Image (cartoon, coloured by chain):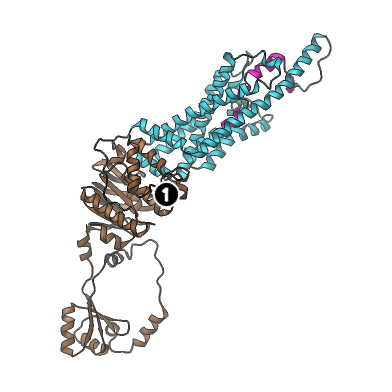
Chain colours: A cyan, B brown
Amino acid sequence: MTSTTLPTAPTRSYKLSFFGTLRSEFLKFRTLATNWVMLLLTIAIMIGMSAAYATALNRFYQRALETQAALEAGGPSPQVRPEYSFTVDQVLDMARSIGGVGMMFGSMLIASIAVVFIGAEYATRQIHSTMTAVPRRSSIYISKLLVLSVWSFLVGVISAVAGYFVAQPILDPGISEQLSVGTPTVLNWLGVGLYCLLMSWMGLGFGAILRNNAGGIVMVVVLMFISTIVFGLLAETANWVADFQPYLPINLGETMTTVGLPEDTDINNLEAGIWLGVWALVPALLGWFRFTFTDAKG
Amino acid sequence: MLEVRNLIKKYGDKTAVNDITFTVPDGRVTGFLGPNGAGKSTTMRMLVGLEKPTNGTALVDGQKYRSLVSPLTSVGALLDAKAMHPGRSGRAHLRSLALTHGIPTRRVDEVIELTGLTTAARKKVRGFSLGMGQRMGIAASLLGDPQNIILDEPVNGLDPEGVIWVRNLARHLASQGKCVLISSHLMSEMSQTADELIVIGRGKILANSSMSDFLALADNSRSLVRTDQREVFAETLTARSITFEPVDTDGLLVQAPSRDIARLGVDAGVLLHELTPQIATLEDVYMNMTRNEVEYQSGTFTTPADSGAAEADAPSPWAGKEAKEQ
């Protein structure tokens, strides 16, 4: 601070633009080391889950073969708990979607990053700098949403693809030789990406509503996991609880990414995706209201 | 030019800013003074659209902040030195602000150099001292080479060199025809920097004038007198109904022009060995003005020595003031 002469910026006029705001938010996202650590963690967890699930599928496959052989021989089927008893076709469908088995945990991390992407702005008071540079707050929020959408979709798809291929050498050759990358598998990958994207919306929404990292993450955990557990416990008590259960985010996510749903299913892949969109859109919209129309205290 | 008209901000029942109106002109440094909680920062935050006024308007060059085409080139604001994510480098923080307006990275490096942050800018903000945070905030406010500059407590935590630098910067910006609004608690600093003054207390404007007009409000009519014959001189003053009060053991603070006092000393045959006109500082005027407006009043310190001296002095005839009050 010894110089008192001010090199003035060239007279060319600079203008605030949406594209500039988007680039700014992208820069803010990629210049935080935490986001890179979380990215690696997410991919590692999803790949690890796929690999672990491959060994489980091998056991299911062996049982399915034994059951098939026993039935063909006309004898009684071996004693297996029904939830672990699958046909060979079912096991093959599960193998087609093996890239997405870690989705629930991966998307949890992604949603947390989304919460922090906006919650930390308030916690660190960075929000004052952000909003002084860009007083049109909607553009900040939409920029954040776009950055998160692209990022979480890519992380979801990349993890699913990587998980799928890492699982191949672990799978029983009897399974893997019958698999080929076709429409169902690709749809599963895209579904995982979409699920991650929608959960990032949920995270951003709660981060903006609560303006608090911990509070936002707790809300996401409650909606994604706790609600599923509670509804599971109470399912026997009332019909509406059981009826509503398939519409919880995690169950919808399962449904959306399942390969080979039965024809007569209540909710098909597309419908599940639409309902999930509602789950994501409502917090994202409420967050936008709170972000845009209330004072930036905090 | 910054303009505030009938601005009101309420938080629930509490009124932080109560119907204030003022203009901050181009080409001048305007000091914004007031006790803690007087509403300075709230007013500044409303100027840059961070908070919505309950009523009234805050305008930048005649426009609301939110409708400015290019906020960063219209207003550069340092409101909060630590309004940065600690996990990002200083340079990345400035680049993120610059990108929104398409300001090139070259300009970012320029303001970094200008504020003396070249060695620190690539480190994470986490490790920055308060002074470095202030320099970062000033760097950010200069990014767009703005017409209006708002600095809230810019010298807070700066080293003496930094304080002088900020003063010169403010003077330089004003000389270029820019509008500079600075708030500070450091009165001596402010008296050297500002041309104009706005004093706020409990959400109300107490004064809005040039520095020289403001200082003229001061009570400059008193003089400090020291003499070995204090009691004799005190009687002389009492006889002429001139008010005074004792100071230390040999001094009197006399409410009269120093020339008249000197004449009185000659007439009474009393040797005055000190005669000093009392010039009020910005601090004195400010303290007088805001005495009843501070929200967080500090306790006063009474030293036992003072009260003891007063009691011992009480019977003496030169305690003219007390005598008159009886």
- Which residue occupies the foreground of this view, A116 or B132? B132
Secondary structure of the residue carrying numbered label 1: loop
**Residue A234 location (% of width, % of height):** 67, 32
Residue B95 belongs to magenta span: no
- Please give left or right for residue A246 compared with residue B246 in the image: right
Q: Is residue B253 left or right of residue A137?
A: left
- Amino acid, disc 1: Lys
Q: Position of residue A128 (x, y in %)?
A: 39, 44
Position of residue A210 measured from the top left corner of the image (x, y, whole percent): 49, 41
Q: Chain of mark 1?
A: B
- Residue extent of the magenta highlight: A84-107
Disc 1 marks which residue?
B82
Task: Count up the numbered dots.
Answer: 1
User: Which image quadrant is residue A71 in?
Assistant: top right
- Residue A174 seen in render: yes
Q: Nearer the viewer, residue A21 or A253?
A: A21
Q: Residue at x 18, y 85 (%)?
A: B240
Q: Compared to B125, does A14 lie above or below?
A: above
Q: Residue at x 34, y 46 (%)?
A: B113
Residue at the front extreme, as displayed: B119
Q: Main secondary structure of the magenta part?
A: helix
For label 1, the crowd category at 10 Å Cα-Cα, with few meaning under 14, some 14 to 19 and many 20 or more, is many
* Res B53 seen here: no
Vertical placement of A30 versus A159: above or below? below
